[in-house]
Image (cartoon, rainbow, N blue to C red):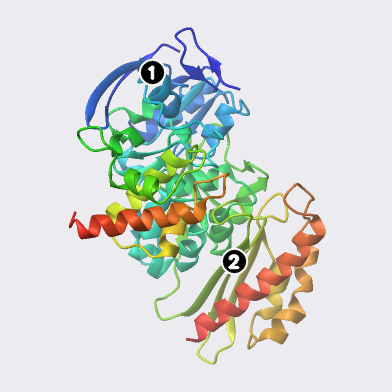
Amino acid sequence: MSKREITLSINGKTHTGAIEPRVSLLDFLRDEVGLTGTHVGCEHGVCGACSILLDDVPIRSCLMLAVQADGHAVTTVEGLSNQDGSPGALQDAFQDAHGMQCGYCTPGMLISAQALLADNPDPSVDEIKDAIGGNLCRCTGYVQIIESIQLAASRLREAGQ
Amino acid sequence: MAREDATGVSVKAAKFDYILAESVEEVVATLDRGDGEAIVIAGGQSLMPMLAMRLATPAMVIDINNIAHLSGIDVRADEAVIMACTRQATALASPQVQARLPLLAKAISYVGHQQTRNRGTVGGSLSHADPASEIPLAALTMDARVSLASASGTRQVALADFFLGPMMSARADNEILLSVHFPLGSNDTRMGTAFHEVSERKGDFAVVAAAAQIQLDANGLCSKAALAIGGVDGVPRRITGLEARLLGSRIDQDKIRAALPEIANAITPGDDQHASAAYRRRVAGVLAERALLEAVAEAEQ
């Protein structure tokens, strides 16, 4: 039951830590690394608040052991901001289009949207709904979340990114 | 409730040892030594919640994600083989699966969400044997078999004999599910498939699901019929009585409706917080009719 040493990339920086095998990647990111942007929701894979990118694809960090991330690249919501720490395009759009109410689901929504826009710069409303289908918003603010993602997509297309 | 270890890191699962296995030989040897206290983790999309809720408290967790040959899809002359650790997202996106195993592709589109399909595996879903999950239902409809390995050798089990009850299967504690084998008809067979389900939210477990695969001969008569219903019993159920009544006939809505009462004889739905048994019985018939009509229409194209 001894601790395992793991080395992974988190938001582009290499991080080495020692962790018990039973600790989830979610708890490792929050408690050990100190990145609390990834939220603890249902902790059994239903709500999507803990979504992160693992090697650029979205997964639930509560459904993976931290030791399983050894050697992989993780992107958390903190990694979606610009280099200078200012909000990234999606984060800006969520602010401008009122894409958050209580904000609890927002990190997971942003991660799902990031993965969507990386593959599909001009998603339809149905494609957006499908992409955030695994993320629950208990404020039920889905319309503004969809509009935020559309706004970010259109800004990114205009910027030619 | 989250607990904390001595250093303040939240933990939920009970303590276990962990090995990142490098080979199937290592897995089966460890399972054998584990004497029922060792468990395999693949995608972890069902096991992680069970660990967190301490419904599972294994002494040893064996990670098979690094065994490269446990992932992959291989279409051979008479069967398609999907290795156990193949991600659901990989299978869903596979042109081979879409072309040769269309019912499986349709079923996987209902499995979870992108975040869970990116980790969850085809073999893990079968091994977990949830009676409301989609991959077991589709694979049962497709007459698939699974390969199971232990320290004493490998055996194949037809899915018809594999599911024994909710989360219970013929896989012994010292066995690992290696691969799933789907029989392939000839390419020129007129086959149609359909998958329908009712769930609270798209991607959630099915309240009721129906899978149908129909083959027609050159005269448009049914040469093979397969229908299975999930969420209505402890295991996914093939409705063999209904299949027998469709065989050899020209299938239309009247024919299907006349055979639908066979479903009631084959299932034993329960009441739970999601739906009553009476609702499940009614929806089973509605979804079965819908799936069969759609499969026949696709086969006739």
Q: Which residue is mark 2?
A: B196
Total count of labels: 2
Q: Is residue B86 visible?
A: no
Residue B258 is tagged as none
Q: From the image, state whether disc 1 or disc 2 is nearer to you.
A: 1
Q: Secondary structure at mark 2?
A: strand
Q: Quarter of the image containing the N terminus of chain A? A: top left
Amino acid at circle 2: His
Amino acid at circle 1: Glu
Residue at the spot 80% in from the left edge and 56% down from the top edge: B277
Q: Is residue B241 visible?
A: yes
* Residue A19 in picture, x, y percent from top left: 39, 17
* Residue A4 in picture, x, y percent from top left: 36, 16
Residue A32 is tagged as 1
Instruction: Answer with the quarter of the image where residue A36 lies.
Output: top left
Residue at the spot 32% in from the left edge and 45% down from the top edge: A92
Instruction: Answer with the quarter of the image where residue B260 lies.
Output: bottom right
